[in-house]
Image (cartoon, rainbow, N blue to C red):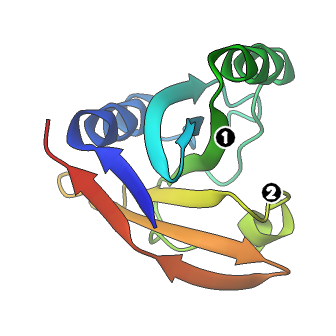
Amino acid sequence: MIILRRTDLETIVRHSQTEYSYEACGILAGKDGVVSRIYPMTNTDQSPTTFFMNPGEQLRVFKQMRKMGIEMLGIYHSHSASSAYPSKKDCDLAYYEEASYLIISLSNRDRPEVRSFKIKGRKIKEEKLKILEG
């Protein structure tokens, strides 16, 4: 299970909508499944079907997380036209088996769909996404 404040979820959705029609991406950080920091990243692919985080940004974020004593809990990205479910490419690039993979579908831009998954060895398991008010 991953736990996210509603305000952070709104930030992620807004980032996804701003980057539309490209996939937006970012890092979720915190402790014990509770997200305390959202790091929107630059998608260097600038593609509607793939993402690749800017390596320089990623390094700075990992250093900041280490300094703050938090860890990467997950990665989020958007799907511009498909459902909030991992694609074959998402599975191919799921290098962090302990991480949650949050997917935001903008196929209906007025009602984004958000789901979270664990991906281990190409096996996809949906996990509970708990949203805290405030």
Q: Nearer the viewer, residue 71 or 49?
A: 71
Choose between 63 and 7: the one closer to the eye. Answer: 63
Which residue is denoted by mark 2 in the rendering?
96
Report the amino acid beneath label 2. Tyr
Residue at image coords 77%, 39%: 52
SS category of the residue bearing label 2: loop
Q: Quadrant of the C terminus?
A: top left
* Residue 20 visible in the picture: no
Q: Residue at x 63, y 72 (%)?
A: 118
Whether 13 is drawn above or below 79: the answer is: above
> Residue under circle 1?
72
Secondary element under disc 1, as helix, strand or loop, is: strand
Whether residue 70 appears in this view of the structure is: yes
**Number of marks in the image?**
2
Horizontal side, residue 51 vs residue 27: left or right: right
User: Which quadrant holds residue 59?
Assistant: top right
Q: Three-letter amino acid code at disc 1? A: Met
Closer-to-camera residue (104/107): 104
Q: Is residue 110 left or right of residue 31?
A: left
Dot 2 or dot 1: first in sequence order is: 1
- Find residue 120 and report its image quarter: bottom right
How many C-alpha atoms fall within 10 Å of the one at disc 2: few (<14), some, or many (≥20)?
A: some
Among all residues in the image, which is located at the extreme left? 133
In the image, what residue occupies the spot 59% across and 35% down? 26
Q: Residues within 10 Å of mark 1 (few under 14, many from 20)?
A: many
Q: Position of residue 21 (x, y in %)?
A: 49, 41
Horizontal side of 70 relative to 103 (left or right) equals right
Q: Residue at x 68, y 31 (%)?
A: 43
- Image height of 85 relative to 94, above or below: below
Q: From the viewer's perspective, tell me whether residue 92 is left or right of residue 106.
A: right
| CB-based contact (under 8 Å), mark 2 and mark 1 | yes
- The residue closer to the viewer here, 51 or 28, is 28
